[in-house]
Amino acid sequence: MTLHSVNTISYSWMALAFIIHILLHFVAAPFGRHTSEKWGWSVNNKLGWFIMELPSLAIMCYFLLLGRHSTESFVWILFIFWIIHYINRTFIYPLRIKPTSKKMPLLIVINAIFFNVVNAGLNGYYLSEYGQSYYTSAWLTSPSFIIGALLFIAGMLINLKSDHTLINLRKPGEDGYKIPKGFLFDYISSPNLLGEIIEWTGFAVMAWNLPALSFMVWTFANLVPRAKNHHDWYHRHFNDYPKERKAVIPFIY
Ligand SMILES: NC(=O)c1ccc[n+]([C@@H]2O[C@H](COP(=O)([O-])OP(=O)(O)OC[C@H]3O[C@@H](n4cnc5c(N)ncnc54)[C@H](OP(=O)(O)O)[C@@H]3O)[C@@H](O)[C@H]2O)c1
């Protein structure tokens, strides 16, 4: 694939993200608290997470291990950041979430596999084919790498800490929801989703290429409406939900 083709696909992919972003303000993606049987066949929640996230991890491992290699290049750092995130999302996160009666529609799993294959495929291919000469030792001391890496790490810590808090709201055997409190939950309903947005913004700043930008745009397109759907859901289900709390951006939205 030429660089022109990779960039054209990235622009088209971002245009699709914009359309999906608008749709997600009207239809909540049906998993977790928004799941519903009307979306057809479904699978166990933990299994669903594992199956849909595995392609992203596998594709990036493939390009890291079997893609082009240059001893001058530090492109492997970007692969490692991505792989660490997806080891958590594929193996650790599904093992940690509490088992409930809720299932995940197969439609969500299939859509997420497609989303992950395109994102990891585009990013892995670009980094492997075109990244070798760009990510040199000079890149390691550039503002783009330093700021991007700090954002990525901060986002990941926020995401992990918030997911940890949410997962531990339920005692063993409990199936319901409680109002989360403390840390960024005092300001927003979904710090875990904000953390994920910050992470992939950091990745795009570090990598500074169109495929990474398109993944950042998709993360924003998916997670801002999801956070708003979670926020509205809390207000519908808890009369005492804190009025001053925003959905995903403290003090703003
Ligand atoms: N990159 C992307 O595009 C993308 C897309 C989606 C998700 N993600 C990531 O995947 C993770 C999960 O996303 P999500 O939207 O499913 O998160 P979520 O709704 O906040 O749920 C996270 C976990 O905590 C439980 N939980 C949430 N709120 C709770 C409460 N008030 N009381 C008790 N338990 C509660 C959920 O149970 P239930 O499942 O039973 O609700 C689930 O097990 C996040 O880290 C997110 O960043 C990424």
Image (cartoon, rainbow, N blue to C red):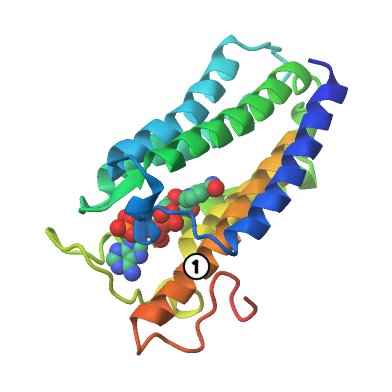
x, y percentage for residue 205? 73, 46
Q: In screen coordinates, is 157 left or right of 177?
A: right
Q: In screen coordinates, is 229 left or right of 241?
A: right
Q: Amino acid at mark 1?
A: Asn
Residue occupying the point 56% across, 69% down: 248
> Based on the displayed image, in which of its 4 quarters is residue 214 positioned?
top right
The residue most toward the right is 4
Depth check: give the residue in front, 210 or 240: 240
Q: Is residue 200 above or below residue 181?
A: above
x, y percentage for residue 194? 55, 61
Label 1 secondary element: helix
Please identify the quadrant where the N terminus is shown.
top right
Q: Is residue 13 above or below residue 242?
A: above
Depth check: give the residue in front, 134 or 181: 181
Label 1 CB sits under 8 Å from any ligand 1 atom: no
Residue occupying the point 69% across, 13% down: 71
x, y percentage for residue 106? 39, 38
Residue occupying the point 61% across, 81% down: 251
User: Is disc 1 surrounded by few (<14), some (14 to 19) or many (20+) residues within 10 Å?
Assistant: many
The residue to which callout 1 is attached is 229
Tell me if residue 189 can be seen: no
Please identify the quadrant where the C terminus is shown.
bottom right
Depth check: give the residue in front, 33 or 170: 33
Q: How many marks?
A: 1
Residue occupying the point 16% across, 63% down: 174
Instruction: Indicate which quadrant contains ligand 1.
Output: bottom left
Q: Is residue 245 above or below residue 106?
A: below
Tell me if residue 230 can be seen: yes
The residue most toward the left is 173
x, y percentage for residue 230? 45, 68
> Based on the displayed image, in which of its 4 quarters is residue 228 positioned?
bottom right
> Based on the displayed image, in which of its 4 quarters is residue 108 positioned?
top left
